[in-house]
Every structure is written in C-alpha cells, then in structure tokens.
Image (spheres, rainbow, N blue to C red):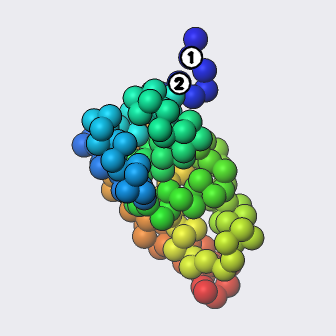
C-alpha cells in the first residue's frame, strides 16, 4: 500500500491535459530539466516520485505543494493564482473540494486574505462543481456562477458588491 506521498491524483474532467503554470525558482527549473520532468508531470506523479526523480533536490513538502498547484489547474477556470488560493485554504487536490460549501470557502478566504472580488466566490463554485462532477462537459465557466449569484442576490433583495 502506498503512503500519502505516493497517492496518485484522481483524474479530472479535462480531455486534453492542461499544462500547469508553476512558479519555480531558476534552481528548481534546472533540477527539473536535469531530471527530465515537466510541469505537467506534477499532475500525474506522486510527490514522493518527484522527490526521488530529483534526487531529493525538490523536498517532499515542496513537491506536495507543486503537485497541488498543478492538480488544481486541471479544473476548468482555475489558473495559477486560484490554485494558490486553494492551497492557502488548506486543500491539497481537487477531490478535497468535494462536498465543500463555496460560500463558506469564500468567507474563510476573505478572513485570510482580506476583501475579495465576488468573482473569486464564483470561481470557488466552479471548482467545487467540477471536482464533484469529474467528466462533466466544460460548459460552465466561472462566470456561469456570477449570473447565479447575481440572480440569488436580486431574489433576496441584496445589492451586489
């Protein structure tokens, strides 16, 4: 049985593999080139495999972080900044979003990072939807949830911010 650092990710709904954008230091880039690893490998390899492939030059904790960032970017409408937001909230991979309440996530994120644009909440809704529905058609981008949020606010008599 594999340890937690060996667990491979669940497959998301994307048909073609997205190439994640990872913020790497020049040293990390050189190490990954030497190990013949690409950013997309962080989606499919376990953190322990990354550490071993780099001879320990990429520490296990950093490999976990990079794998998390890459895996979140597999979800529709999630780019590097949103992936970092999920990591700041304590999530490690898309399956951790299953069953989460996007509104509560948004409130928690505002406590951590300060006031946010409501579109961030829409991105949370989008990510939770696709984490809960792997294989769903990618026909609901983040702004789909903007329309729903605004309709809810109108129904409740609240002004949007």
| Residue 126 in picture, x, y percent from top left | 48, 58
Question: Would you say the residues marked 2 and 1 are in contact, meaning their CB atoms lie under 8 Å apart?
Answer: yes
The correct choice, above or below, for 117 with respect to 61 in the image is below
Q: Residues within 10 Å of mark 2 (few under 14, many from 20)?
A: some
Q: Quadrant of residue 13?
A: top left
Q: Which residue is mark 2?
A: 6
Q: Nearer the viewer, residue 81 or 76?
A: 81
Q: Quarter of the image for the C terminus: give it.
A: bottom right
Q: Quadrant of residue 22?
A: bottom left
Q: Give the side of residue 81 with respect to residue 107, left or right.
A: left
Q: Residue shown at 57%/61% (left/top)?
A: 85
Q: Residue shown at 42%/55% (left/top)?
A: 24
Q: Give the side of residue 126 with respect to residue 19, left or right.
A: right
Q: Residue shown at 50%/56% (left/top)?
A: 83
Q: Residue furthest top?
A: 1
Can residue 76 be seen at all in this image of the molecule?
Answer: no
| Residue 41 in picture, x, y percent from top left | 35, 37
The correct choice, above or below, for 45 with respect to 142 in the image is above
The correct choice, above or below, for 115 with respect to 138 in the image is below
Q: Give the side of residue 56 with respect to residue 111, left or right.
A: left
Q: CA distance from mark 2 to mark 1?
A: 5 Å
| Residue 52 in picture, x, y percent from top left | 45, 27
Q: Quadrant of residue 150?
A: bottom right
Can residue 157 be seen at all in this image of the molecule?
Answer: yes
Q: Residues within 10 Å of mark 1 (few under 14, many from 20)?
A: few
Q: Nearer the viewer, residue 143 or 54?
A: 54
- The tag on residue 2 is 1
Q: Quarter of the image for the N terminus: give it.
A: top right
| Residue 19 in picture, x, y percent from top left | 30, 49
Q: Residue furthest left?
A: 16
């Amino acid at each position: 049985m594999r340890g937690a650092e060996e667990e491979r990710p669940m497959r998301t709904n994307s048909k073609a593999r997205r190439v994640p954008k990872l913020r790497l230091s020049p040293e990390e880039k050189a190490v990954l080139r030497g190990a013949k690893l690409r950013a997309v490998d962080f989606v499919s390899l376990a953190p322990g495999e990354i550490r071993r492939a780099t001879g320990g030059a990429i520490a296990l904790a950093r490999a976990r972080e990079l794998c998390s960032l890459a895996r979140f970017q597999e979800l529709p409408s999630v780019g590097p900044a949103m992936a970092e937001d999920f990591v700041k909230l304590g999530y490690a991979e898309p399956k951790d979003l299953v069953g989460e309440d996007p509104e509560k996530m948004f409130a928690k994120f505002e406590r951590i990072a300060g006031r946010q644009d409501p579109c961030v909440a829409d991105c949370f809704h989008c990510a939770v939807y696709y984490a809960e529905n792997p294989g769903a058609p990618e026909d609901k981008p983040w702004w789909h949830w903007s329309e729903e949020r605004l309709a809810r606010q109108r129904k409740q008599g609240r002004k949007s911010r």
